[in-house]
Image: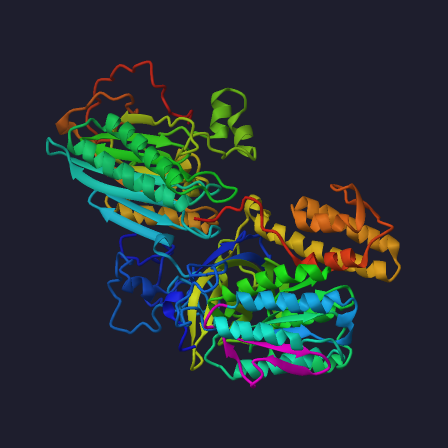
Amino acid sequence: MASLAKSNLPRFTTDIFQNEYLAEGAREVNAIVTVTATGGGTTGGRPLGAGDAGGDAGQSAAVVLMVDCSGSMDYPPTKMRNARDATAVAIDTVRDGVAFAVVAGTHEAKEVYPGDGGLAIASPATREAAKQSLRKLTAGGGTAIGTWLTLADKLFLTRRDFAIRHGILLTDGRNEHEKPEDLQRTLDRVSGHFTADCRGVGTDWEIPELRRISSALLGTVDIVAEPSGLADDFRSMMEAAMGKQVADVALRVWTPANASVKFVKQVAPNLEDLTERRAEAGPRAGDYPTGSWGDESRDYHVCVEVPTAAVGNEMLAARISLVLPQAGGTAEVLTQGLVKAVWTDDLASSTKISPQVAHYTGQAELADAIQEGLEAHRAGDLDRATSKLGAAVRLAHQTGNEGTFKLLQKVVDVVDAKEGTVKFRKDVSEADSMTLETRSTKTVRVAGKKRPE
Amino acid sequence: MMEFQRVCPFCAEPLDPQDVFCEACGRHLASAAERGEEQQPAADDGDFELPAPNGCAQCGSLSLSQDGYCESCGAAQPRPRDHQERELSGVAAVSDRGVRHHRNEDAFAVAATSLPGGENAQVAVVCDGVSSASRPDEASQTAADTASEALLTALEHGVEPEPAMRGAILTAAEAVAELGRTSGPEAGRNSPACTFVGAVAAGGVVTIGWVGDSRAYWIPDDREGAEPYRLTEDDSWAAGMVAAGLMSEAEAYADARAHAITGWLGADAEEVEPHTVAFTPHVPGVLVICSDGLWNYAEAATDLADLVRVDAQRDPLRAARAMVSFAVGAGGHDNITVAVLPVLPDPAGGYTDTLLDLPVITAPAAAPPMPPVPPVPPHPPLPLPPR
């Protein structure tokens, strides 16, 4: 923390979108909170070596690459080769001064580079040495992802002075050589120590399993159906990691006495339910982890139930802040916004739905419809699958989520997008089906969103 | 009636001397006193200590946030605009949030000055922000402040009250329109907008100007000897229907659209048409200008007159408070703002010809002799309602 240069801290701003007017007797308050971080000096696309020669100009970041080397990575052999190439590209993207390591993952975890129980500091020489060592990455053995995470955690802990700690995890199969509860125990232990993006290559991995890991570690999950796409994906993940300026940021939600938080969800750029991740933070306040931030903008949907009040009353339903915990239990407030409740007998005011709240409610329904539809399809219930994916098509069309709409079209033939009339395609590939499911939580923002003044 | 009575500074409810909290609105009275909002400290206050100043108005918690909410129950704390009072020599005004609206979107301005000739002039302006528009509270405050300033400047430079009033309304309209231009409207809402009613009392002549449905009433001190009058004609759907002969007054005011206003100050107003009327009172009385938060409960001039204390001429603030208190007690469905300007006939200055000389039904003993009736020009039309 000490080395976190103040000038590199992004400036955080909050916008609250809500209809604060409630009808008499109403208790539920919904708001979309847009948090934007700017001016952190993100250098996501900066050319290599542009930093100071000393190598300490970049942020104090540490990155551990975890590469699946289980036996299945050799089927087809291009998978292992592409994984090696992608890892090399990722290493090239590591900025000077950033601490890094490469871990080979099977039923156990092995240090590939630097191999001395710690992290290497990136420089032209260490990057080259790391790439050389990738030859040691060969396929053979099982899969126990918990052991990989445990080793990454151990490596990160050797340099606690690096505030931003991020892992990149690549796997091609199920976590077969470890009990689910063992993985969960590991996740509980390491969560909060570092963040991680997870990638599944091919179609033999389990979406819920990888999503569980990426959610716990506040990162993204995606499919790389074709091994040849790995290099580009690794580069962009690494660039995003290099762009992070501040770690361990929490969304703090204060609610008044006798109110309760119904849910707190990140809704953009992707859906992530944070409700169960609450950590109490003083009277009537709770912290929800958001991980590390670069120059970026995220939306949260907060739903609070407040005690009702007579018409004409105004209440603060929630105070939402982004906080950076400090040593000694205090927290620096980076930005805050107010969610209000105003009871009125003016129906025109109380029946209005905030366009932002409506939009993200639709995006959450869209994700649910896709997941339920594909689950029904797997269970052989084609009627239910068709009806669910039809609803998904309608929602994707309605909310302008073109990315998801295109993915849906690979699984169903769209007869009428507006009505949600679809036919299941006969020749749906596993890759298309998995891509749709993995990316179902990807949301789009409200078109032409206006910022409040 | 003459003994002193303390009233709640927030809602004008009469208080007992020993009250610490208001029985009607529940607000803590000490906090208001410390903020200097209480206009008339009770004479028999004594030396007792008031407990727990500045606690939450809702739950009593002592931890209140900087931004005006209780850190415990979240209740919005009373804001300065929730209840405001002002009294100058010859004019007083009171504004209150009421019961059913969460903020006070009404605003007023009162001022006194002297004309180049040395005569005193009193000015009062009442504006009512349009709730369905953006930032109605800003609109009303801007209009009231701007118009009052413009009126004073014009009057002090010798401009006649009527052109001064027209000019002030147009200046205020421009200021409100500018509010809408400098920062855009809130999502789904129109540009900031408000109504306007203003009065100038100078040299025995009263000049009224208005846009929208805020009103002016003339209430003579002697209700037996003279008749109260409404002086303004609403820019409202109902008034428009009645004026066009399309509906009876009862039908029009029973319609859901009755109160939709057809004239206002704001960027969305197609054209602001200030209405003005001047008149010369022949008997002592008070001019009451108010937002619809009051007149909704006493629409007819005779009903409103019943709410005006008989000593209004001498104590306009108390009269204004009593009217606000009445409206709050009647349900306080809207914000309530009332300004009271006592007016005495000025026989020494002679009667200026004005559009309108209010008839005196029976000349009271103290009343001056009737002046000659001036010729009534063909326009603008007389705004007097048929009551």
Residue B22 in the image, given as x and y percentages of width and height = 39, 62
Whether the magenta-drawn stretch holds residue A114 is answered as yes
Quarter of the image where one finds residue A100: bottom right
- From the viewer's perspective, is residue B110 above or below residue B61? above
Q: Quadrant of the N terminus of chain A?
A: bottom left
The part of the image, by quadrant, that contains residue A422 is: top right
Magenta segment, which residues?
Answer: A95-122
Q: Is residue A314 magenta?
A: no
Up the image or down, A208 lies above or below B310; here it is below
In the drawing, does residue A107 fall left or right of residue A442? right
Residue A391, relative to residue A441: is it above or below?
A: above
Residue A175 spot, x, y in % from top left: 75, 76
Q: Position of residue A181 (x, y in %)?
A: 73, 81
Asked if residue A254 can be seen in this view, the reply is no
Quick check: A114 left or right of A416? left
User: In percent of the image, x 40 and y 39: which residue is there?
Assistant: B180
Which residue sits at x=73%, y=46%? A394
Q: Is residue A225 left or right of residue A155?
A: right
Q: Residue at x 64, y 69 (%)?
A: A215
Of all residues shown, which one is farthest toward the left? B117
x and y percent of residue A383 in the render? 87, 53
